[in-house]
Image: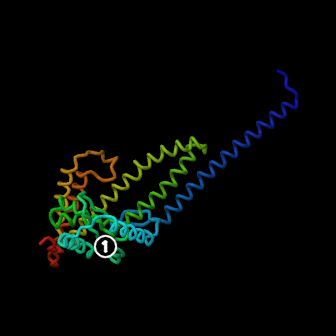
């Protein structure tokens, strides 16, 4: 086929325009990547903190805002959940809780700690930001003495002192940013491709980032919790006895890498590893006359 000069010129102009578009696309792609890396680096740099165990944390959220939200949710829970009315049970759980909170130091010691004992059979306890502790009375079927209940309460208190709620909220925020940026890069910026990449990355983030992160927090809460209970005069060895019972009760065997909590065996091993320091705290507490009698 014979082409005249005008057609050759048009073809050359078209090729040059296409090359220009490709070049600009690549430059925009690089700018997004560089900007994204710079943004995440700045966020990580300004948000670094340390937990009570010395572990590096990323704290982005306002503690005051989280405490206010925790107080609001706690009020809603008290209004909507059936609360235990038996003063003996309330006083017992409050006695253990007060003993644990009394040994807390730093900013957490100045929090307005509150307790709700809920009349539900589930073996569960949890804590909201700002020191709002919720204990189901079903936990008392497993924590059958004050020392075992102290292991539960110490663990929940540790979540607050280690600012785990703030850390999780911060991690969720930064993980979302990271997923969006990576999805654009891997997906090429096209809507369908980006959505597919985002879904794949979100699944990876849940398994590879958030779950181990939760397990790390739970393990840290165990370590701090056994320290608090021992300093308050509760026998730290009872934490292991509690988890032996919890293990026997929990028949589901979810692989640890898929779970948000460490396995029962791992928790027991980690708690036993804390015996040297926790028993030292316990003996000091006893010599100082700290031996709560909440279940007498």
Q: For the point 31% across and 58% down, which residue is it?
A: 218
- What's the image's color scheme? rainbow
Q: Is residue 253 above or below residue 117?
A: above
Quarter of the image where one finds residue 269: bottom left
- Which of the pair 197/144 is nearer the observer? 144
Q: In this view, does 246 lie to the left or right of 187?
A: left
x and y, in percent, of residue 138 in the image: 22, 60
Q: In this view, does 1 lie above or below 236?
A: above
| Tally of numbered tags | 1
Q: In which quarter of the image is the C terminus?
A: bottom left
Residue at the far left in the pictured view: 296
Quarter of the image where one finds residue 270: bottom left
Q: In this view, does 204 lie to the left or right of 35?
A: left
Q: Is residue 211 left or right of residue 195?
A: left
Quarter of the image where one finds residue 69: bottom left
Q: For the point 54% across and 44% down, which residue is it?
A: 195
x and y, in percent, of residue 232 in the image: 21, 73
Q: In this view, does 266 lie above or below 66?
A: above
x and y, in percent, of residue 118 in the image: 26, 65
Residue at the far top in the pictured view: 1
- Which of the pair 259/26 is nearer the observer? 259
Tell me, yes or no, if residue 258 can be seen here. Answer: yes
Tell me, yes or no, if residue 159 can be seen here. Answer: no
- Which of the pair 42/84 is nearer the observer? 84
Q: For the point 36% across and 52% down, which residue is it?
A: 212
x and y, in percent, of residue 10 in the image: 83, 34
Q: Is residue 126 above or below residue 212?
A: below
Residue beneath disc 1: 114
Q: In this view, does 242 lie to the left or right of 194?
A: left
Q: Is mark 1 on a helix, strand or loop?
A: strand
Q: Quadrant of the N terminus?
A: top right
């Amino acid at each position: 086929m014979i082409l005249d000069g005008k057609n050759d010129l048009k073809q050359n102009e078209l090729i040059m325009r296409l090359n220009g578009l490709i070049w600009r696309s690549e430059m925009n792609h690089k700018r997004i990547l560089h900007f994204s890396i710079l943004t995440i680096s700045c966020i990580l740099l300004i948000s670094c903190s340390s937990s009570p165990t010395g572990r590096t944390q990323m704290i982005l959220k306002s503690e005051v805002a989280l405490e206010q939200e925790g107080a609001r949710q706690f009020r809603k829970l008290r209004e909507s959940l059936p609360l235990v009315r038996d003063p003996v049970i309330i006083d017992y759980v409050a006695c253990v809780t007060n003993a644990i909170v009394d040994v807390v130091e730093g900013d957490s010691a100045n929090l307005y700690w509150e307790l709700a004992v809920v009349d539900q059979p589930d073996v569960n306890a949890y804590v909201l930001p700002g020191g709002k502790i919720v204990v189901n009375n079903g936990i008392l079927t497993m924590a059958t003495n004050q020392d075992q209940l102290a292991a539960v309460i110490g663990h929940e208190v540790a979540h607050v002192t280690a600012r785990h709620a703030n850390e999780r909220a911060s991690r969720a925020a930064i993980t979302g940013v990271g997923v969006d940026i990576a999805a654009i890069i891997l997906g090429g910026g096209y809507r369908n491709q980006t959505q597919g990449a985002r879904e794949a990355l979100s699944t990876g983030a849940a398994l590879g980032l958030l779950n181990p992160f939760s397990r790390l927090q739970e393990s840290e809460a165990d370590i701090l919790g056994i320290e608090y209970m021992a300093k308050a005069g509760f026998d730290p060895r009872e934490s292991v006895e509690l988890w032996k019972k919890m293990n026997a009760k929990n028949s589901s065997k979810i692989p640890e890498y898929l779970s948000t909590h460490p396995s029962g065996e791992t928790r027991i091993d980690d708690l036993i590893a804390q015996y040297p320091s926790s028993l030292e705290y316990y003996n000091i507490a006893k010599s100082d006359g700290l031996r709560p009698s909440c279940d007498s």
